[in-house]
Image: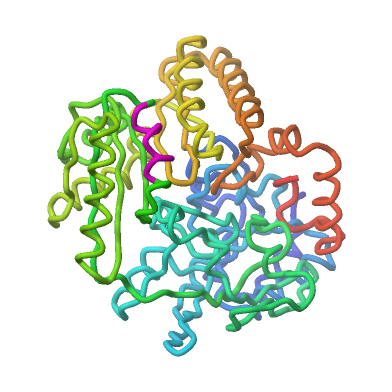
Amino acid sequence: MSLKQEQIAYLKEIVDVPRIWTKEEIGEDYSHDELGGVSGYPDILIKVQSTEEVSSIMRYAYDQEIPVVVRGAGTGLVGAAVALDGGIMIETTLMNHILELDEENLTVTVEPGVLLMELAKFAEDHQFLYPPDPGEKSATIGGNVSTNAGGMRAVKYGVTRDYVRGMTVVLPNGEVEEFGGKIVKNSSGYSLKDLMIGSEGTLGIITKLILKLVPLPEHSVSLLIPYGKMEDAIGAVPEIIRLKSSPTAIEFMEREVILFAEDFLGKKFPDRKSPAYLLLTFDGNSRMQVEAEYDKTARLCLENGALDVFLVDTPERKDAVWSARGAFLEAIKASTTEMDECDVVVPRNKIAEFIRYTHELAEKYHIRIPSFGHAGDGNLHIYICRDNLEEGAWREKLESVMEDMYVKAAEIGGAVSGEHGIGYAKRVYLREQLGEEQIGIMQGIKRVFDPKGLLNPGKVI
């Protein structure tokens, strides 16, 4: 829809004019997210600073039936924060304050615009750890919660959902509600807090979060383990899990992606001779315990096909390895003209089968499909690269590859998204996988929260 001048004028009474942009004033970055495959401009962009402002905007939008999309840092990959229907875009990056550290209850209270890297540093400075560790450190915490982001430490610590204790939410009608709190247990009716987590801005607008922290481990060491074949690398993962050595992270990567990262960063990786690698991290409060765990795991890997084991324990090696791992997405993006992503999650013992299948698809469709991901929890990040394909051929091949991959994921017991969400780009695949009954239940939940369908319309379901 297109906003009327009187509607824009009213919104300018609610929020200071310097924090409002309209139509041609809105920068191109606000028309898409990080991946860029879905685009659309809002009629008005408002950078909010408080729950009260969000509430006032939503009351007016609800009364006037104006669609509203919420955006954080814009690092999403599925078009969830794109204003496809115009209307109002609420941006939360100015709500970026860490409000309270409660050391007795092991919680930190933050606004949704706080960046993940800011929260991680704050926690560590106070000898705590905020365990969720998605690759995109410049994402906002509100965005992480809205997609239930996972990240590299999920194999030991779990995902974002496991660290959300409470939240303040503005409902589509402007009402402000508190879901959850600082309590550890809660069996008091349906968990509305958990419905909000992963809902991608379709049910309400999060304006404050109470997050769980854990004591900061005193020791952390990583192992970089090269293999001659990807199948051997991923095949070792179930054995590592069975060993009960409790790695914090188990990542997999192929040489092609490492070379992209080297070019992108201008830094050398400690080793790039082998076709495939596992990257494991171990942490704990006892150096002896950490050493025993990684030594036991290293021996197992060497007995089961690993070519070598490199200890990543110096600041230089840690920087080289983890900066490369953090840059994989941007490095692949820089290597091609356009790309799309599939972030399926499959059972751990099916990872090798699925990666092998992506190699077969690359040969079948004559298209480049690099990948990396979280081997410890089966979450794969697979990228289909356009390179020099003509528009028509690119769209045709992309649709075929995506369809084949999602069908394969369903066949082996996987799901459409492990941590990036559904947004607009993956809706059709979610519907195919879940079926009409489950989609109908989700639509019913949406109607209860948002009976006019104004909040982030056209997303997820």
Q: Residue at x 40, y 32 (%)?
A: 235
Q: Residue at 34%, 39% (x, y): give it.
A: 328
Instruction: Out of 105 and 342, give the one closest to the viewer.
Output: 105
- Which residue occupies the foreground of this view, 170 or 257? 257
Q: Is residue 123 left or right of residue 228?
A: right
Query: Looking at the rendering, which quadrant does residue 315 occupy?
Result: bottom left
Task: Residue 207 in the image: state x and y as whole percent.
Answer: 60, 73
Residue 139 place in picture, x, y as percent: 45, 57
Tell me which corner region of the image, top left, top right, bottom left or bottom right, holds residue 396: top right
Colour mode of the rendering: rainbow
Q: From the top left corner, tell me how far across and down residue 231 is, in percent.
A: 38, 26
**Above or below, comparing residue 237 to residue 454 in the picture:** above
Q: In this orientation, which residue lies closer to the viewer: 399 or 250? A: 250
Q: How many marks?
A: 0
Relative to 318, 420 lies left or right: right
Residue 275: x and y in percent read: 27, 25
Which residue in the rendered view is the most extreme toward the bottom?
104
Residue found 46% across the figure and 85% down from its top: 100
Front residue of 287 and 447: 287
Q: Is residue 131 magenta?
A: no
Quadrant of the snapshot with the C terminus: top right
Q: Which residues are magenta?
A: 232-240
Q: Residue at x 19, y 52 (%)?
A: 319
Give the side of residue 419 with respect to residue 290, left or right: right
Examine the residues drawn in magenta and state their main secondary structure. helix
Q: Is residue 32 above or below residue 254?
A: below
